Image (cartoon, rainbow, N blue to C red):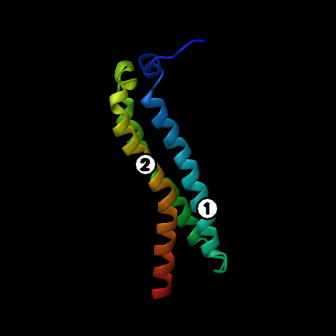
Amino acid sequence: MVRITSAAHAHHIDWRKRMSDNVAYGLLVYTALQIFVTMQAIEGDSGSMLPMLALVVLVAAIIPLFRRFERHWEHLDDTAAADPALKGAYRRDQFAVWALAIGLPFLLTGLFKGAATLF
């Protein structure tokens, strides 16, 4: 039986790749939720293209923000990318990516619906 030590396991950690994967999956989840939530919100509205344009803008606007998280980790060299001491910083950024990916579509749609009721 081969036992993997924590040092050997740490060598296989690559925070750069992990953050890149989180950003990619987060963008997919954000886009899917934005489409689903927005389409539900505008289902009864007229055939205006404005909501669709807003949807495209909202999806395009999130890409630079998510890319910023990814860029933060890209500068690491191979040794730093495998440093277990970065786990806390990685988890903080990972939480932020997923909080934005899941929460932002609902928040934005709520804001739009709220504004629509005022006008």
In front: label 1 or label 2:
2
| Residue 112, position as x, y percentages in the image | 49, 75
Residue ranking furthest to the top = 1
Identity of the amino acid at label 2?
Phe
Q: Is residue 106 above or below residue 79?
A: below
Q: Is residue 31 above or below residue 71?
A: below
Tell me if 8 is positioned left or right of 49 in this view: left
| Residue 92, position as x, y percentages in the image | 37, 45
Q: Report whether residue 43 is seen.
A: yes
Among the two numbered marks 1 and 2 on one chain, the one whose residue lies closer to the N terminus = 1
Q: Which residue is mark 2?
A: 95
Identity of the amino acid at label 1?
Ile
Q: Residues within 10 Å of mark 2 (few under 14, many from 20)?
A: few
Q: Which residue is mark 1?
A: 35
Q: Report whether residue 61 is seen.
A: no
Q: Which element type, helix, strand or loop, lies under badge 1?
A: helix
| Residue 31, position as x, y percentages in the image | 57, 55
At x 55% / y 59%, what residue is drawn? 56
| Residue 83, position as x, y percentages in the image | 36, 25
At x 52% / y 37%, what residue is drawn? 21
> Residue 73, which numbered label?
none
Disc 1 + disc 2, Cβ < 8 Å: no
Q: Is residue 52 above or below residue 102?
A: below
Q: Which element type, helix, strand or loop, lies under badge 2?
A: helix
Residue ranking furthest to the front = 1
* Quadrant where the image shows the N terminus: top right
Q: Is residue 77 above or below residue 117?
A: above
Q: Residues within 10 Å of mark 1 (few under 14, many from 20)?
A: some
At x 53% / y 48%, what residue is drawn? 27
Viewer-side residue, 44 vs 15:
15
- Determine the CA span between mark 1 and mark 2: 22 Å
